[in-house]
Image: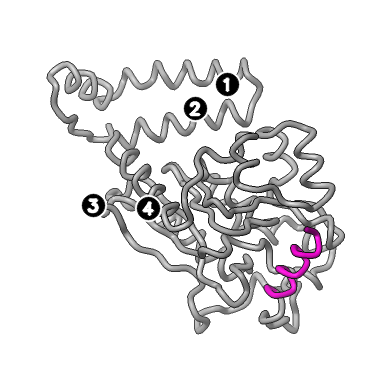
Amino acid sequence: MSKAVRNLWFLAGSSIRILRNPWKFQQCNFGSAAHMIKTEKVGDKRNVGLIKLDRPKALNALCNQLMQELSDALVEFDNDTSIGAVVITGAKRVFSVGADVRELCAVEYEAISSGNTLQNWTQISKMKKPIIAAVNGHALGGGCELAMMCDIIYAGEEAKFGQPEVIIGTIPGAGGTQRWLRVTGKSLAMEVCLTGIPITAQEAKECGLISKIFPVDQVVLEAIKTAEKISKHSPLIVSLVKDAVNSSYETFLQQGLRYESRLFHATFATNDQKEGMKAFLEKREPEWTSS
């Protein structure tokens, strides 16, 4: 399995040009480069933002340009009041093989330790709107970390999730060691990160890493359906729900419970809480104002 992972990374890197000054790749001008993601509004009401990683020759390796485009697209969707949730997906064969190894290969310690190298990876955690990862094929290294940054993960039957960084002499750098532990427990987190061997979609479902498995050609459609359901609710309350769950995920239980209680109380100061309950009693659809 490790050999297969190596081959995937080799294929991803074979078509990537090495920059003359790779340690300065954050300042590169990509103005004339081809776009590496595709975005559109989908769903019956066009209220779901769809982002597709589109760097097929490199198996969606997450270079700085792609991550900058992804970050910009997320900001745009987060600021678009017509969008209630976002879906991120890749290709049917591969979600993403992870960080662009050729781009990172010559980065020196001083540059990597500055904290700027992965600066474009933080936008997902800043999103107020829910994000669903629709994963087909391999989600490896940074690709797996990208999926785990999302709020919900749906996977195709042939999907695989793993952290093979140890194979190339490094460790996960965008949350892999931390998120695997919190979701799956210490033993599986250690196994995945120490061996570099990915797990299947079925194993990922069993350990709680993902919530549902679908046929390959249905994953994105099902993710969009769920995003549409989320988009029907009050954007304000949805953001508070997401905030509360993430608080529990990122803090100790008692801190999370106290934070949840404060947010719950705060909802009763909103117009949407009053409208939602009134609409329920009157058996009609609520009219959300996000106030």
Residue at screen point 56% across, 68% down = 66
Q: Which residues are magenta?
A: 1-12
Name the residue tied to disc 3: 44
- Helix, strand or loop at label 3? It is loop
Name the residue tied to disc 2: 244
Label 4 to label 1: alpha-carbon separation: 33 Å
Circle 2: residue type: Ala
Label 4 to label 2: alpha-carbon separation: 27 Å
Name the residue tied to disc 1: 256
Q: Nearer the viewer, residue 289 or 89?
A: 89
Residue 135, horizontal then vertical, whole percent = 53, 53
Q: Does residue 233 lie above or below 274 as drawn?
A: below
Instruction: Answer whether residue 35 is magenta in the image.
Output: no
Q: Which mark is residue 221?
A: 4
Q: Which mark is residue 29?
A: none
Residue 86, horizontal then vertical, whole percent = 41, 50
Circle 3: residue type: Asp
How many marks are shown on the rendered structure?
A: 4
Q: Nearer the viewer, residue 154 or 23?
A: 154
Residue 255, horizontal then vertical, whole percent = 61, 19
Predominant secondary structure, magenta span = helix
Name the front one of labels 4 and 3. Answer: 4
Label 3 neighbour load within 10 Å: few <14, some 14-19, many 20+: few
Residue 22, quarter of the rendered image:
bottom right
Label 3 to label 1: alpha-carbon separation: 36 Å
Classify residue 170 as left or right of residue 130.
right
Name the front one of labels 4 and 1. Answer: 4
Residue at screen point 63% across, 56% down = 139
Label 1 neighbour load within 10 Å: few <14, some 14-19, many 20+: some
Residue at screen point 32% across, 18% down = 268
- Helix, strand or loop at label 2? It is helix
- Helix, strand or loop at label 4? It is helix
